[in-house]
Image: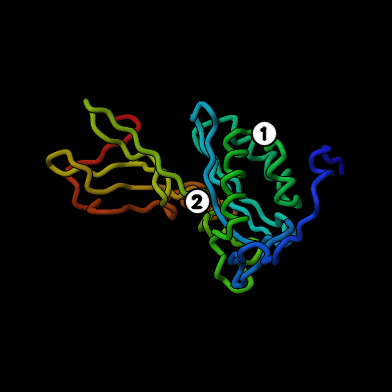
Amino acid sequence: MNYTAEVMDMCPVAKGAYHGPAPIPEEGKWVQAKEIKDISGFTHGIGWCAPQQGACKLTLNVKDGIIEEALVETIGCSGMTHSAAMASEILIGKTLLEALNTDLVCDAINTAMRELFLQIVYGRTQSAFSEGGLLVGASMEDLGKGLRSQVGTMFATREKGPRYLEMTEGYCTRIALNADNEIIGYEFLSFGKMMDFIKSGISAEEAIKKATGHYGQFDNAAKYIDPRKE
């Protein structure tokens, strides 16, 4: 360690009591985090790129400073899906500090990593007060049956009004309108369920029927429209 001449000429003064860092909540414990290995937690965060044309939702499960599980969900940018594929390989097995200082291919994913880092090291995780934290694999529960991201896609114009294109339940195939042309329900196709049916040996036509449902006052509509064509 090198010191300036001014510091070298100073007389030593004893330091007072050392109280350590404030404890943060981690998986049902209060932890005085001093090193990366002291950090554990399960949390989510959102990131965006500089032109703000796409976003990433990142979920991490950290145990003893190591990323044991990662869920990378993206929207709005076609290239970002490929970036997410690479990021899923890059993230797992790294320490939090390594991941923070690693190029995760896409600005939106890098930004999400930054936001998650802040949550985790300040004890603001979803599992902060859950004894033992969450099991590795917990993020898959957020995807639901068929393991697909929760996506909502709506399009609207002043001239023609709104169109429901995708809901949590799935791909919107028809919109139900009342006599005043107001939306009162919709029909959807759950791609996750459909693919599960097909993989189990059911024909595609039958799988589509089994995976189709509706919401709202769909049966009482004055008319039905295809939101992508009509």
Q: Label 1 sits on what residue type?
A: Val
Q: Nearer the viewer, residue 38 or 213?
A: 38
| Marks 1/2: CA–CA distance | 32 Å
**Residue in the picture at 23% in, 27% down:** 158
**Residue in the picture at 46% in, 51% down:** 206
Mark 1 crowd level (few <14, some 14–19, many ≥20, 10 Å Cα): some
Mark sitting earlier along the chain (1/2) = 1
Quarter of the picture holding the N terminus: top right
User: Would residue 216 appear left or right of 1 to someone viewing this image?
Assistant: left
Q: Nearer the viewer, mark 1 or mark 2?
A: 1
In the drawing, what numbered circle is on residue 15? Answer: none
User: Measured from the top left, where is residue 130 in percent x and y?
Assistant: 56, 71
**Residue in the picture at 80% in, 54% down:** 12
User: Would residue 15 appear left or right of 160 to someone viewing this image?
Assistant: right
**Residue in the picture at 29% in, 32% down:** 156
User: Would residue 115 appear left or right of 100 to someone viewing this image?
Assistant: left
Q: Nearer the viewer, residue 210 or 102?
A: 102
Q: Nearer the viewer, residue 221 or 27?
A: 27
Q: Circle 1 is placed at which residue position?
A: 105
Q: Circle 2 is placed at which residue position?
A: 194
Instruction: Give the SS element for disc 1.
Output: loop
Q: Label 2 sits on what residue type?
A: Met
